[in-house]
Each structure stands twice: as C-alpha cells, then as structure tokens.
Amino acid sequence: MHQNAVEKYLEQLREVKQRGNVFQAFSRGTANAIYEEATVEVATLQLRKILELLVFGFVLATGEKAIPAYVSFAKYKNVKEFFSKIRKLNKDYYPQPVIQKRNEQGEMQWIYPASDEYLTPEDFDILFEHCDRVLEPRRVGALPMSLEQCRTANLRWYDKIVRLLNAHLVHPEDNDVAYLFQMGASDADPTCNQFKLVSENSPPKASRDKNLKHSDVTPADHLHRQLEYLRRSCELYDAGHYDEAVRLAVAIRNLVHDTEKSKSLLRQMRVKEQVKLTTSFGLSEKLLGNFQPVSILPLFVSSAEGGTSVPFPLPIPPILITVKEWWDEVVWMQKSTLTRKKIIVDTANKEGGAHVQTAAPEVIQELRQGLSQVSSLKINGVEVGSPENYHLILIRQFAHELLNSESLIALAR
C-alpha cells in the first residue's frame, strides 16, 4: 500500500469508529429516533454504511486494479460478485483479525481468533442482506423480524465487526510488507504499523483457516462447523430466505440421524446418549386439557395479544430431553402424526437438501398446505392468514432449539 492509500484506509476506519458510536447510542438507548421502528432502522443503517466503508478499504488494500469491481459494486450492491472479482486480484483482500495474548512463558504474542468470533466474508454477505431487509420499503409496513430480534441481531453483528477491526492485518498482493491497523481507545484515532515479512508463510494469509486443515479437524471442529451452518442459515431465514430451512434440515440430519449405512455426528462423537436438547413442545402444557396440539408452535395462542415472532419463545426454565426423545417427539397432529425425524428426513431427502423428488410425498404436501384448523394468524403483529410450507417454519424452530441446547453447544467449544 502506498502511503496515500494507508492514510485513506485510516480515514475509513475513523468513520467506521464514528458510525459505531452512533450505532451504540441508538442500540443501547442513549439516543432514539422518536419511535422504535425508526430507532432500529437508524442503527441498522450504520451497520450498512460500515460495510460500505469496509468494501472501499478492500479496494485500497488491493490497489487501482480493483476500481472497476468497486464501481460495479457501488452501482449494483452485489457483495458476492464483488468478492469474486476482488479475490481474483488479491486473494488476501480480506483483513485478518489478530489478538494479543500472553503465552505460557508470559510473553506477549499475536494469535488468530476462531472464524466464528469475527465478521467473515460469508458473514459479510449475510449482514448486507439483513440490512437490506430491514431498510428496504415494506408493503405491509412490518419488519421481516420482530424489533427485539432485529435489535439483538444488530448487536451481535456489531460485536463481530469490532472483533474483525480492533486489530487486523492487511497484506497487499505481491508486497513483502504487512500492515497492522489498530482501532485504539474510544477517544483515540486508529493507527498503522508496518512489518517486514521474513518468509512467505508469515503472517498467515487471511484466507487460511486452521479449522480447515484436514489433519487438525476434530469431532468438536465438525460439530462447531455444523452449528455454524445452522446459525448462518437461521440468519438468512430470518432475513426472508425461507427456503434456507431446507439446508437447516440437512445440518440437523447430519447431527442426529443414524442409519444402517451412516452414523450421525453425535453418534461418532459417542455423546448421543448424554446430550440433552431443548424442546418447545412443553408450551402446550400451559393450554387447556382438551387441547390437541397441531404443532409445537403456539401461533394461535399468542395472536390475540398482538402476534408472536419467529422463532417462537422457548419455555423458561428450558425443558430438556434426550436426543432420542427429541428426534422421535410428535410435533404435528392433523391428518398425519409427524415427528421431528419424519419432517427433517423427508425435507432433507426429498425437498432439495441432499436429493430432489419432484412429486412431493403426501406428508410434505400436507405441511405445504399449512394448518387446516386455523384460518388466520398474526406474525410479528401482522395478520398473515394461515401459513403455508409449515415444515419450513417448524424446521426453523428445531434449529432454534438446538442452538439453545447448552450441552450441545458446550461440546463444540
């Protein structure tokens, strides 16, 4: 990077820092835009502007040859296309976050955080989509997720941005200098230090991920990866991409489904009998004794109180059951009586997750038609009628249960 590019990069970071201050003020209640929807939108706009500033930072790190890709991005806002183009120009276009910690000898060393701790290129695309969903004009006047969900998601995304940028390395293509940028204290300007590279392998390339080295992959790494797939697909589902539930079904199947020819990940880890999973089904215990559960989701119960949000709240305290009980639990009772296993396996195997079956089985057709006993519901406070593709809604809830099952999450740490 030429000195001029370094100065411009620092200027970008200064604006990121200022917009971060605005985000925190509107997200944590010290500032507001008169009413809640507008307040959330102002905070979300800061995330979107920060992403746009980072994109220009990638261009600065790559050089003038990246300008055509940036012009296309500025016009069409297509993150995947931009990343594809700039990766061909500089495979290390994305900053590598670093953390300073003491080793066993008490010496300070720079280490590289796990990929789930900071905003990755994959996260970047999901967050951009999330911002668009919140900020784009809405015909029905409601956010695609509840305000509380949006606020919580925004804070989680902002924390990932902070971890990416707090201290990060930029390594321009064909350059023997690495640039360490640090955001500094809240009242300080970002700084830059240059380091001469002593070998091709130092520092590690931004595109390298230690968890992807074949020899280093452990069962816990695989579990962590599957849970990350769940989390990312949940983010996309909540942003309005409801067919992501099909990919959720594949990840859930990988975790818990055993056959004669294949073993689930939990079986391979020899923990399937010990893990306890959270269930939503216990919510029906609060209903009338003659209630026949048509599904685990209490949509029609909460619709009289302004509607509910997706995913639906879990019982407090959580109801924990074994993996087998969770997998075989009946969660749908209409024409068919269905378990989680039946819904997940049929969706993964016949709805395009792992295989495609053009003529959907009768069970899937019933789930596509939705609830015959309920004529109208409110979701996020908006009257929506009776949902269709009910298996997608159910699968989103199943993922929510897994991502809130502490004994499962602990195994991936």
Image (cartoon, rainbow, N blue to C red):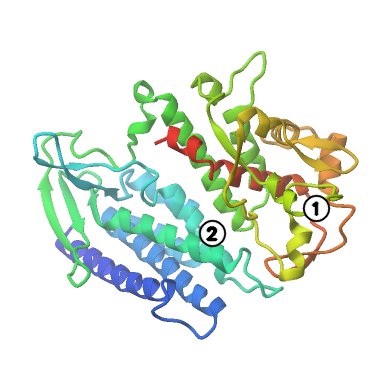
Q: Give the amino acid at mark 1.
A: Glu
Seen at 69% across and 34% down, the residue is 348
Q: Residues within 10 Å of mark 2 (few under 14, many from 20)?
A: many
Residue 138 is at least partly visible in this image: yes
Position of residue 227 measured from the top left corner of the image (x, y, whole percent):
50, 39
- Report how far apart the C-alphas of labels 2 and 1 lie in the structure: 24 Å
Instruction: Please state which of residues 328 and 132 is positioned toward the viewer in this rendering.
Output: 328
Q: Residues within 10 Å of mark 1 (few under 14, many from 20)?
A: some
The numbered dot on residue 129 is 2
Figure quadrant of the N terminus: bottom left
Look at the numbered disc 2 and give the secondary structure of its residue: helix
Q: Which residue is mark 1?
A: 388
Rendered image quadrant of residue 32:
bottom left
Position of residue 85 measured from the top left corner of the image (x, y, whole percent):
42, 50
Figure quadrant of the C terminus: top left
Look at the numbered disc 1 and give the secondary structure of its residue: loop
Position of residue 359 measured from the top left corner of the image (x, y, whole percent):
85, 35
Q: Residue furthest front?
A: 289
